[in-house]
Image (tube, rainbow, N blue to C red):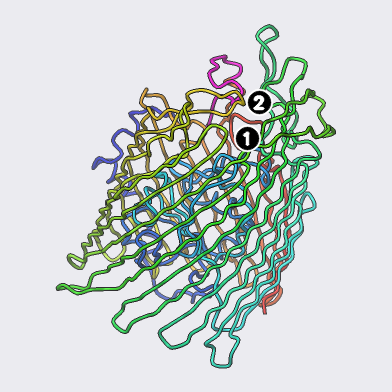
């Protein structure tokens, strides 16, 4: 399909919108015709079900609403889907959601993992309702943090696409991710699962939950995870371990006090945060694609990283008799990440393979306090309406080594085998301090039985102090972000909606003189339709959107150590649409599928974000042919991507540009599970069965996992 700008220029006009709504009706209608004699739902978790969707969420507004009545695009990944799909890291789990794309630089466990939605990096993260600021770490990316968070911890994951006006209000207009960890259950239950697969991958997960007193007013849950191996790059090794413990205590029938602790540890050896350039050569001998196989590793044997993270979360919740609720959340995070890295061939490869090993170190120890106080409930003015208001505060501090003087050691990219000495390094010291205080309020006014208006705002006070080799800043800003949305029920199953949300993103990027760029700002307008049937077990969504953003950072040049400085003269305009269907089509047949399109242009009219696919299609479906079997398939397709190489960002050479592109591709995964008895399951996942070779980002020699398998046995008690 040709990506002509005029193709999407009118995605919000009536004609296109009506076509989208018609497609939605065709998708949802067969499953909504008959809603009687349905099989009962088997509940696997507190909030999710034996399905691939949820009936409601509070991730978009702060109070619980049916998905059909939330005037924003939202999807949910349930614990059942995570188990069926066999994803183990949070990064890979999120990558299965509609419109989310993963750009991975280097290995899965040591590299930069950038998740994008609607073309923009996902940097808004909420853990059990608390906003967690992004900061520290290489390039400010959440790669190590997200990739070392195990997906077995989560009861459900909500992804709200678009501008995060009400929930965090600080960040890109891509998506906000709300992680809902598993909580103690009222009944006693447990499971233990063991798995083994390709590249010496082994995994053990034990989960035990239930009441700790005879009255059930004290409940506990513990999850222990050990995951080792699975690195497909040559010579690379990795492991991660997680301990999660949670307590819920009811001092009275209307009050719950919760406390939970999570400890994470991860280590890697011989793996790289980056990789080779995609080309080699020079103007005299010409330029050619670099080829060493999809498992080639640009890291030396001594490269290593250590990650240790700890989280303490507490919540006090009181439910009043008049449908009001008061909730206080406090979270403390402490992480320590230390990476000794080396990468070969990232600053150019000569015609004979001559290149350099670039060696350095990332080290950071961020600590963060997050507090959220809120009240939500209903008020009556003629009709009952929903309301939430509250206050949140985040304090982030990191005295760290943000970078080091990089050492260059000559070597050869064609013959490199990891055997090279580690050079001495001189380190730079630095700091990163952030403060965010917010007041927020939102209400959904029920104008009639079919019309609802949602309005709200968030006032933010932002402060950041940053010191590096080139920056010494004390930056303060305040801003009010408004939000307005509306839904209209066409009938009991189909609704129309529209929403306006604002964009505000303070930046860490600096100009050549060390001054911080102005915050990115703008707005998003979207309109769409949502369908729901079979008692909300099947959800459909169609949306078209447009976005404008100014003060976008662009690289203006390089400093002596090759780190960039920026200006903020660019602006972005984006248009796109999403079509999604998720849930249970009929008893025993579950599906999650979506087609998305996104097109972003810069001020000069050129395509922005060319490394992010404009088109994506995702399909995951499972079917139970009987009580004992589940079979399924996962298909992911994306359109062509391209970008300029980091070692030569201004090149116009056709051979270099061709080497730094990735043609459209698809991957296919298969799964099957057999239950010889009610509480025992044996399963197998075969991933990338066609052994498709594809780059995880177009301008780096970093490939996705080749064909691999994972076998699992699980016992429930």
Looking at the image, is 207 positioned above or below residue 21? below
Percent coordinates x, y for residue 130 in the rendering: 46, 62
* Number of numbered labels in the structure image: 2
Q: Which mark is residue 278?
A: 2
183 with respect to 36 (left or right): right
Asked if labels 2 and 1 touch by Cβ distance under 8 angstroms, the answer is yes
Task: Tell me what residue is drawn at x 28 percent, y 35 percent.
Answer: 10
Task: Tell me what residue is drawn at x 49 percent, y 41 percent.
Answer: 616
**Measured Cα–Cα span from mark 1 to mark 2:** 10 Å
- In which quarter of the view is residue 196 placed? bottom right
Q: Secondary structure at mark 1?
A: loop
Magenta range: 640-656
Task: Tell me what residue is drawn at x 45 percent, y 69 percent.
Answer: 329
Q: Mark 1 sits on what residue?
A: 695
701 or 616, nearer to the observer: 701
10 Å neighbourhood of mark 1: few (<14), some, or many (≥20)?
Answer: many
Q: Secondary structure at mark 2?
A: loop
191 with respect to 19 (left or right): right
437 with respect to 426 (left or right): left
């Amino acid at each position: 399909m040709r990506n002509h700008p005029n193709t999407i220029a009118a995605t919000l006009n009536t004609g296109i919108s009506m076509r989208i709504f018609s497609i939605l009706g065709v998708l949802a209608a067969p499953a909504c015709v008959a809603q009687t004699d349905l099989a009962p739902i088997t509940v696997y978790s507190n909030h999710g079900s034996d399905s691939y969707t949820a009936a409601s969420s509070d991730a978009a507004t702060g109070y619980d609403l049916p998905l059909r009545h939330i005037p924003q695009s939202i999807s949910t990944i349930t614990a059942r889907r995570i188990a069926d799909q066999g994803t183990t890291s949070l990064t890979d789990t999120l990558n299965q959601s509609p419109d989310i794309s993963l750009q991975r630089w280097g290995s899965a466990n040591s590299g930069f993992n950038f998740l994008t939605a609607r073309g923009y990096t996902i940097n808004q993260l909420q853990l059990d309702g608390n906003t967690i600021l992004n900061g520290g770490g290489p390039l400010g990316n959440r790669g190590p943090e997200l990739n070392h968070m195990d997906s077995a911890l989560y009861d459900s994951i909500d992804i709200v696409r678009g501008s995060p006006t009400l929930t965090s209000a600080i960040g890109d207009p891509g998506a906000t991710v709300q992680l809902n960890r598993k909580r103690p259950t009222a009944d006693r239950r447990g499971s233990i699962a063991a798995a083994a697969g390709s590249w010496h991958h082994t995994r053990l997960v034990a989960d035990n939950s239930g009441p700790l007193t005879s009255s059930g007013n004290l409940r506990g849950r513990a999850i222990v995870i050990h995951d080792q191996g699975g690195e497909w790059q040559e010579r690379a090794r990795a492991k991660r371990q997680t301990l999660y413990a949670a307590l819920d205590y009811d001092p009275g029938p209307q009050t719950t006090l919760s406390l939970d602790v999570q400890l994470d540890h991860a280590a890697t050896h011989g793996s790289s945060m980056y990789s080779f350039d995609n080309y080699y050569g020079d103007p005299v001998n010409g330029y050619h694609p670099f080829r060493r196989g999809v498992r080639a590793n640009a890291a030396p044997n001594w490269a290593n990283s250590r990650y240790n993270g700890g989280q303490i979360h507490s919540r006090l919740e009181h439910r009043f008799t008049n449908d009001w609720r008061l909730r206080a959340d406090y979270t403390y995070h402490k992480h320590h990440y230390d990476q000794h890295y080396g990468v070969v061939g990232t600053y150019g490869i000569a015609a004979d393979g001559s290149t350099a090993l670039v060696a350095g170190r990332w080290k950071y120890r961020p600590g963060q306090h997050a507090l959220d106080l809120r009240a939500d409930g209903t008020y009556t003015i003629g009709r009952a309406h929903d309301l939430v208001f509250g206050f949140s505060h985040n304090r982030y501090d990191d005295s760290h080594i943000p970078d080091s003087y990089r050492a260059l050691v000559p070597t050869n990219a064609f013959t490199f085998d990891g055997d090279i000495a580690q050079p001495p390094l001189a380190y730079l010291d630095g700091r990163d301090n952030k403060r965010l205080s917010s007041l927020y309020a939102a209400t959904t006014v029920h104008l009639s039985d079919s019309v609802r208006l949602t309005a709200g705002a968030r006032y933010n006070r932002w402060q950041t102090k940053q010191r590096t080799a080139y920056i010494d800043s004390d930056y303060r800003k305040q801003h009010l972000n408004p939000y307005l949305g509306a839904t209209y029920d066409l009938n009991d199953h189909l609704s129309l909606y529209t929403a306006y949300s604002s964009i505000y993103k303070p930046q860490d990027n600096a100009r050549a003189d060390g001054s911080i760029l102005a915050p990115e700002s703008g707005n998003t307008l979207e309109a769409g339709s949502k369908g729901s049937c079979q008692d909300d077990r099947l959800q459909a969504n169609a949306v078209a959107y447009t976005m404008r953003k100014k003060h976008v950072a662009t690289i203006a040049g390089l400093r002596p150590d090759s780190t960039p400085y920026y200006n903020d003269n660019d602006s972005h305009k984006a248009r796109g649409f999403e079509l999604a269907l998720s849930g249970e089509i009929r008893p025993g047949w579950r599906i999650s599928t979506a087609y998305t399109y996104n097109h972003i242009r810069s001020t000069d009219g050129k395509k922005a974000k060319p490394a992010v696919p404009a088109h994506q299609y995702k399909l995951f479906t499972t079917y139970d042919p009987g009580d004992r079997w589940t079979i399924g398939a996962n298909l992911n397709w994306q359109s062509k991507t391209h970008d300029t190489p980091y070692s030569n960002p201004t090149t116009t050479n056709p051979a270099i540009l061709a080497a730094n592109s990735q043609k459209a591709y698809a991957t296919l995964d298969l799964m099957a599970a057999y239950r010889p008895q009610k509480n025992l399951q044996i399963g197998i996942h075969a991933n990338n069965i066609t052994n498709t070779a594809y780059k995880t980002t177009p301008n780096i020699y970093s490939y996705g996992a080749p064909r691999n398998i994972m076998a699992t046995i699980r016992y429930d008690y």
